Image: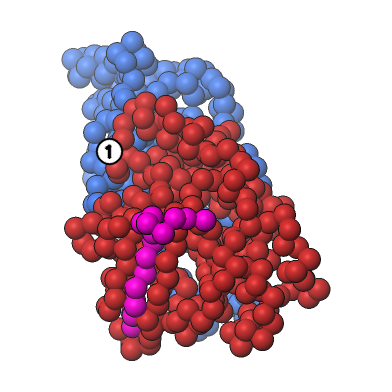
Chain colours: A red, B blue
């Protein structure tokens, strides 16, 4: 997908991280993500997935090794820039949506980046349009359904125009219809995508490549279809496909979602 | 208004949706007018019954204009009751001279003090009821911000509004979970279960606070909340703030007469 000389969107090298209680969350993680790539990070609960996510924008600092985003190491002096480039959508939209209205929440990130007036309004409008929530602009978050809140949470991050969009368990608590809508939203985005999940069919639907994280290490890396086809590998790492789900029979129409749809950014640009 | 999620108790304050002229006034104008009115009422000498009558007429006009049902205003006025109970004691306990009303000896200064609380309290509370019923909570916060209330204050109020409903929802779910396991404490000696729940709720809210803070950091939060309230309404939109001038005129007239 990418030329050899291209700077990786995200590069994680030998990252180790132990929590204060001594529990090793990341035990030497190596991972490269090319620009425009869609990567699923699979793993059971407690594998270190969320800890890895918090390293990608410097909320947690690697105790060993380094994280490089778009050629910039994630260190204190680069934090503002790194956080602009890497947008994280957290698991619980109620944590992500903290302002009184949808508009104010979506405007929070770009306003922090210094945008005002027409520029700010354009960003907000573009991000809300990208997730199909334009008509809920003035709603309070608690008036939205869970699926709508998830989409607004994504809009709050899109509004900062990240190069890399990271979603932590995006399908958690979504009903099938909301899950479907989320797939469409993700397919329409022109960004590098990292989807952290233990929802294996969803990984197959949205991401061409998958890695399996367990015990703080990457234990598998390959095309999502191949990874999911390896039943022994999945079982060894507490990952299970839903009953009757056969990745070999689904593969065809998925995993190339990037190319077909228009980029939201081109819609939103002034 | 779409469906909430189960347990998603929203906090909409006391807002009653509507399109009346009062609803359409800019929030900062309404806040300023309400505060000005309340100060005028407080400044009015308590003996000037006619001045309070004038204030009441003015307020009743605004209530009617806002299309608020009087029964709603009356219901919400109940919040005053504890203060009125306090006022009710004053005629019995106040100093002399005393007057006989229906054979009960009451203190004259006590009666005036009670009247003072009842009249000013009722007018002030009614004014706030009108403000709260015609202005969505988010707009109130915006109005305060436009009136240059420090953003730290409006941000704290905003977080409270946003998370009050969520914390209440968690409390409700914990209550249901307790009941489902056959524990429904009603008496003081059963307080232990409630206390444990309160503690758990505190820890959960604290943890949520940390997660919210992380989400803010991830979107570039640097210690200051962004200015999102927009600009203050232009001067012509401020004419409703002149309404309390009537109340001030009444107060001034009453002071002159006294």
Residue depicted at 30% across the width and 57% down the height: A71
User: Foreground residue, A3 or B55?
Assistant: A3
Q: Is residue A3 magenta?
A: yes
Q: Taking B146 as reference, is A5 above or below it?
A: below
Question: Residue A36 location in percent, x, y?
Answer: 49, 52
- In the rendered image, is residue B226 in sight? no
Q: Taking B85 as reference, is B41 above or below it?
A: above
| Quarter placement of the C terminus of chain B | top left
Q: Is residue A107 left or right of residue B235?
A: right
Residue depicted at 29% across the width and 13% down the height: B235
Residue depicted at 29% across the width and 76% down the height: A65
The subunit letter for the residue under badge 1 reads A
The residues colored magenta run: A1-18
Q: Taking A102 as reference, is B189 above or below it?
A: below
Indicate the quadrant where residue B256 lies.
top left
User: Foreground residue, B135 or B36?
Assistant: B135
Question: Residue B36 location in percent, x, y?
Answer: 28, 25
Q: Taking A38 as reference, is A235 above or below it?
A: below
**Residue hosting label 1:** A114
Q: Is residue B14 magenta?
A: no
Question: Residue A123 location in percent, x, y?
Answer: 42, 35
């Amino acid at each position: 997908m990418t030329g050899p000389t291209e700077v990786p969107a995200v590069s994680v090298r030998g990252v180790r991280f132990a929590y204060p209680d001594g529990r090793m969350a990341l035990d030497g993680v190596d991972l490269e993500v090319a620009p425009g790539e869609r990567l699923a990070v699979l793993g059971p609960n407690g594998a270190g997935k969320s800890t890895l996510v918090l390293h990608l924008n410097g909320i947690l600092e690697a105790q060993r090794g380094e994280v490089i985003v778009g050629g910039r190491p994630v260190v204190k002096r680069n934090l503002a820039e790194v956080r602009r480039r890497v947008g994280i959508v957290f698991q619980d939209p109620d944590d992500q949506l903290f302002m009184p209205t949808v508009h104010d929440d979506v405007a929070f990130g770009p306003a922090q980046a210094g945008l005002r007036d027409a520029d700010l309004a354009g960003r907000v409008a573009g991000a809300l349009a990208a997730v199909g929530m334009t008509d809920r602009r003035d709603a309070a978050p608690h008036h939205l359904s869970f699926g709508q809140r998830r989409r607004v949470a994504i809009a709050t991050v899109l509004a900062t125009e990240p190069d890399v969009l990271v979603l932590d368990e995006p399908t958690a608590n979504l009903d099938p219809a909301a899950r479907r809508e989320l797939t469409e939203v993700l397919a329409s985005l022109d960004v590098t995508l990292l989807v952290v999940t233990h929802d294996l069919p969803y990984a197959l639907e949205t991401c061409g490549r998958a890695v399996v994280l367990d015990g703080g290490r990457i234990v598998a890396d390959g095309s999502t279809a191949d990874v999911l086809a390896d039943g022994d590998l999945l079982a060894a790492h507490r990952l299970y496909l839903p009953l009757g789900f056969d990745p070999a029979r689904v593969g065809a129409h998925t995993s190339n979602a990037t190319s077909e749809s228009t980029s939201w950014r081109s819609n939103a640009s002034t | 208004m779409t469906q909430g999620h189960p347990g998603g108790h929203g906090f909409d304050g006391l807002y009653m949706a509507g399109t009346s002229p009062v609803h359409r006034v800019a929030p900062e104008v309404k806040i300023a007018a309400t505060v000005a009115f309340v100060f005028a009422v407080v400044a009015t000498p308590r003996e000037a019954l006619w001045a309070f009558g004038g204030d009441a007429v003015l307020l009743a006009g605004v209530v009617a204009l806002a299309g608020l049902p009087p029964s709603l205003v009356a219901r919400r006025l109940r919040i005053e009751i504890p203060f009125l109970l306090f006022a009710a004691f004053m005629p019995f306990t106040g100093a002399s001279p005393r007057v006989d009303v229906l054979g009960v000896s009451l203190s004259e200064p006590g009666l005036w003090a009670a009247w003072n609380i009842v009249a000013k309290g009722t007018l002030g509370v009614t004014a706030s009821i009108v403000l709260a019923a015609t202005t969505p909570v988010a707009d109130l916060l915006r109005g305060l911000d436009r009136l240059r209330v420090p953003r730290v204050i409006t941000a704290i109020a905003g977080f409270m509004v946003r998370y009050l409903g969520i914390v209440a929802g968690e409390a409700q779910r914990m209550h249901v979970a307790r009941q489902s396991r056959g524990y429904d404490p009603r008496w003081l000696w059963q307080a232990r279960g409630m206390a444990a729940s309160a503690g758990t709720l505190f820890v959960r809210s604290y943890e949520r606070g940390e997660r919210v803070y992380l989400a803010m950091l991830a979107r570039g939060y640097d210690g200051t909340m962004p200015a999102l309230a927009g600009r203050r309404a232009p001067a012509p939109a401020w004419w409703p703030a002149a309404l309390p001038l009537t109340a001030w005129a009444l107060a001034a007239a009453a002071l002159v007469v006294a």
